Structures are given as C-alpha cells and as structure tokens.
Image: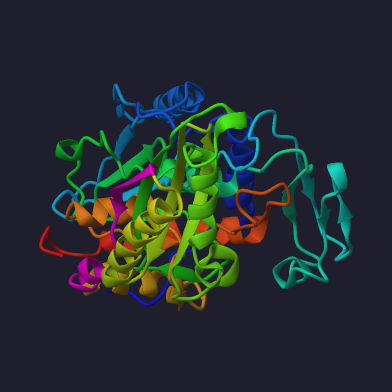
Amino acid sequence: MSNQAVQINETVITGLVVKRFLTYIRYWTTSDRHIDATPSTPGQWDLAKALVTEFQDLGIKEAELTRHCYVIARLPATPGKEACPAIGLMAHLDTADDVSGREVRASLVEAYNGKKIELAEGNVLDPALDPDLAAQQGKSIIHTDGTTLLGADDKAGIAEIMGALEYLLAHPEIEHGPVELIFTPDEETGKGLPEFPLHKITATACYTLDGGPVGELEVECFNACKADIHFKGRSMHLGYARGVMANASLMAASFAMMLPRSESPEATDGYYGYYCPMAIEGNPENASLECYIRDFELSGAERRVAALEHFARAVEAQFPGGQVTVIPHTQYYNMRDKINARPEVLDILKRAMSNLGITYRLKPIRGGTDGSRLTELGIPTPNIFTGGRNWHSRIEWVSIPEMTAACKVVIELIRLWGELPNTKA
C-alpha cells in the first residue's frame, strides 16, 4: 500500500466543502427524541431529498431515499477495481434539539484576527477561553450568530463527504473501489439506526465523519442507556393532605437530587461515566423523569442502572403510598472491541492521515455516533474529525482548513482501500 498521497488541489476542495456546508445548514433538521417515528421531524426529509437530487446532478445513478429517510448512494469502482472491498462513508442529517437549529445565520470569517467575537444575546467567542479558537488566528472559520446552533454536527460531515465525491468524479485518474455514501436521520436522539436497511449495504467497513478537531480519530464510545422513571403519587386536597398525600412532583425532584453530582456530565471527562437527568415533568399524582446513563465499560452502565432502582426504593420510603418504576432502555454499545477485531480498518485510516502529513490521535467519544450501532451490526465504523467545535450550542464554530483536511482524508482513504486486491480485506 502506497505511502504517498495523491496530489489534491486544496483550493478546489475548500470551495466544494464550504459552499455545500453553507447550503446545508439552512435546512432546519432538528430532531426530537420524544417522538418514536423515524424520522422524528419533517425537516430532515427536506435535506435528504436535496442530497438525492445532488447525487443525480453529479451523475450518480444509484441514489435512494428510503421510506424512513435514509439516503444511500453508490460511487461505482474505477474500471478494473470492481473486486476491491466496498467501503462506506456516513454522516447524519439531523441536529440536536438542545438549541434551536431554525433559521441558522452563519458568518464566514476569513483570516480570523484572533480577537473576541461578540455574538447575539450576549454570547461570545473568546479565544482567551478557547485555545482551539485562538489557534485559528490567520485562518478561516464559520460561526453561528449566537441565536442558534451552527449545525456542523453533522452537516460539516455531509459537506466533506459530498465534496470528496465531486472531486473524485472530476478526477478519474484517482482510482478507487466501490464506495457507499450513507446519510442517516435522528442520530442525535440516540435511537441507533432503528429502521436502517442493513440488507442494502455491501461495505466491509464504514467511516463516520462526525468528530472534532483535526487529527482526532475515535474507535471507542460510551455504552449508552436511557431510563424512563415514573412516579405515581397520591393526590389529596392540600388542606387535608397530612398523612395522606404523596406528591409525585416532589418524589421526582427528590429522586433527581439523589443522582451523584460527582457523576454528572459537568463533573466528568475522559473515561469517566455519568448520570444525566434530561427532562422532568409532572403533577402531584403523576410525574416522570428521563435520565441518560453513560459509561465506557458495560459493568459501569449496569451499576448505574442498578443504582437507579435503589434510589427508587429510597424515594418510596420517603413518600409512603407513592410508587416509583424504573424502565431502562439500551441505546448503543461501545464499539471498541469489534473495531479492534478488524485492525486493518483503523490501520488504513491512520495511513491515509499519515500520507497527508496529519498527525492522528485516538480519543474516546464522550457520546456515540451511528457508527456505534453500525459496528454492533457487524460493519466496523471508526469516527473521523470534521473540524467542528462547541457542538449543540450558540457558540458553535468550525475551522475551514480542518474541513478541507477531513475531505482530503476521505479522498485518500478511498484511494487506499482501492489498492487492496480483493474483497477479503
């Protein structure tokens, strides 16, 4: 396998990626974790349909939009490379509902001067507090206006995949095997590809573009669980409540306060897991709490689920007559072991980055991607950087040189897989 990357015109790549990204973020694709249907919101259809049209305009004959809003397209192999193993590239259509993703107004800053950027509603991009931003001085960035998120998670990934596709189509001298391009709905809801048509995929390996700073590679993620906790109280006129009433709203609040603050997202990093209450609502008779559990080790996730049961019994003891029910749901598993069982999948990615002079570093995902579920389904799927920062927030921004670098990695990755002699990678 070659140790020297094909020559790629960075100026052309940048133009392809930035134009697409600024187009894609205008689509309102916020997903809704409270809705079971796939997709959970209608706006995701708009971007999915636009991408299918874009594939067709580029001359891609196989481009399909499934009835559950999965986009699957195929780049045919260069003549003579048909027997090479097929690989997949994946990114997601939706944005998180933590912050509004409607009517995104982005600013493109060329040759960033390294100074503080004042945004709307008192939000600020401050290089003194953000070393990654400070490092972009003299480079180009795109940031939100402060009223919404930006949507780099994961429209940067989509733009990088589509930019690589157009570049390859314009440069047939870059030989490659078969490539499957996959865009998915509802990644941010943690559903884990519930309606994904796995039977349509032939790829022996896949790569998500859903990461952060340049050089980051991710092959391990949380084991994820969601617990729905229901509180049944006993209502009574407040003037006659003594000794009779069990206030379900207060039960839910008491339960939430039992979650260890030292095991919360804001108190942990690295390989430390956590509990996170995501929503709480109710009245004196009935209340509910939605809690996320995350841990890199399955035993840690299981320990936390068991702890929720203990908290439930403690709340029942505090509120005689009240009942607490904990219903856990597995969302996805750590993809580490299954990716490690196919070392060539990561080795080729590392080689692609090395050939481009990009220093890679492995970093655990404090979250998950659709690659987590796809890996579980049998297709190892590491995660590649996209250049985005401060996801799910009003101070989200993305580095244009890093988007260009991610697109180049995709092109080189595709080329290297095309050097393998057969489908037994």
Q: Which residues are magenta?
A: 321-342
Please give the count of numbered marks on the rendered protein: 0
Residue 195 location in percent, x, y?
Answer: 25, 33
**Residue at coordinates 41% horizontally, 30% vertically from top-left?**
55
In the rendered structure, the answer to whether residue 378 lies left or right of residue 2 reads left
Q: Position of residue 200 (x, y in %)?
A: 18, 36
Residue nearer the viewer, 57 or 86: 86
- In the rendered image, the vertical position of residue 386 relative to residue 92, given as above or below: below
Along the line of sight, which residue is nearer the eye, 199 or 245?
A: 245
Name the residue: 72% across, 47% down. Answer: 394
- Side of 262 relative to 201 (left or right): right
What's the residue at 53%, 65% (across, down)?
Answer: 264
Q: How is the image coloured?
A: rainbow
* 397 vs 49: above or below: below
The correct choice, above or below, for 216 with respect to 292 in the image is below
Out of 112 and 423, give the one closest to the viewer. 112
Res 49 quadrant in image: top left
Picture coordinates of residue 270, whole percent (x, y): 49, 76
Q: Specify whether residue 329 is painted magenta.
A: yes
Judge whether residue 392 can be spotted in this image: yes
Query: Which residue lies at the image location 55% right of the left edge and 49% below the top edge?
Result: 253
Which part of the image, by quadrant, shows the N terminus?
bottom left
Residue 304, percent from left and from top: 35, 65
> Nearest the camera: 362 or 120?
120
Q: Is residue 368 visible?
A: no
Q: Is residue 325 magenta?
A: yes
Q: In which quadrant is the C terminus drawn?
A: bottom left
